[in-house]
Amino acid sequence: MRCIPTATTLVLGSRQAEEIVDRHAAGRTGLEIVRRRSGGGAVLVDANHSVWIDIEVGIEDVRYCAEPMAMMAKVGQWWMEALRSLNCCPPDLWQFEGAMECDAGGDVICFAGRAHGELMVGESKLVGLSQRRTRDGARVQGQLHFADPTDVMLKVLAESSPLTRRPALISGPCREIIDAGLLAALTAAIV
């Protein structure tokens, strides 16, 4: 399911304190602030500068993985297959494996860290993933950016964060291809 935000919004992870946001600065920039039910760092959703897709896998589905990290890895593989099918896969794309790493401020801003299953270009995250599990299955939210949201996010954070990584971006002709065709390509990869 492609999710298209109606406003540029800073989305906090489920475990992040509201105090990390300077509400006055957010108001001046016109950003809405909301919270998601899945964990991880804050993300900026913007219909003009990113693509956000949720993938739901029911517990009875043969593609469901009971182990959360396995589910993240599988969804990351689907994203990689979809990007390759669109011929928009950077040549040095790879999938991160292992425990979440927040050494670069990723505990504050999602794209500065990395977690199991996410797609990387060099040391920068291209596709961020976040998972919410219920008794009915798993919902994995995924996002990639066409423009770097870091500076916008830093303007509304109450405390500066020691960021050393910025997201990898999709630009040029691939931006239009992905914007128009990623949902269909992901659907084909999953089936």
Image (cartoon, grey):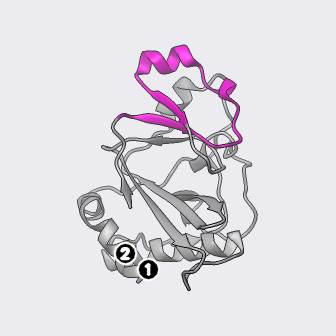
Identify the secondary structure beneath mark 2: helix
Which picture quadrant has residue 128? bottom right
Say whether residue 127 is visible. no
Total count of labels: 2
Residue 3: image location, x then y, percent: 38, 52
| Residue at 53% in and 13% down | 24
Please name the amino acid that badge 1 sits on. Ile
Residue for point 46% across, 60% down: 54
Task: Answer few, some or many: residues within 10 Å of disc 2's Cα (few below 14, many 20 plus, some between 14 and 19).
Answer: some
Where is residue 146 drawn, in percent x and y? Answer: 36, 50
In this image, 158 relative to 44: left or right? right
Where is residue 59 shown, x and y percent of the image? 60, 75
Residue 14 falls within the magenta-colored stretch = yes
Query: Which region shows up in magenta?
Result: 7-34
- The circle on residue 190 is 1
Residue at numbered disc 2? 187
Relative to 87, say whether 162 is above or below. Answer: above
Circles 1 and 2: CB atoms closer than 8 Å: yes
Q: Quadrant of the C terminus?
A: bottom left
Q: Is residue 185 visible?
A: yes
> Alpha carbon of mark 1 to alpha carbon of mark 2: how far?
5 Å
Q: Quadrant of residue 95?
A: bottom right
Q: Nearer the viewer, residue 100 or 93?
A: 100
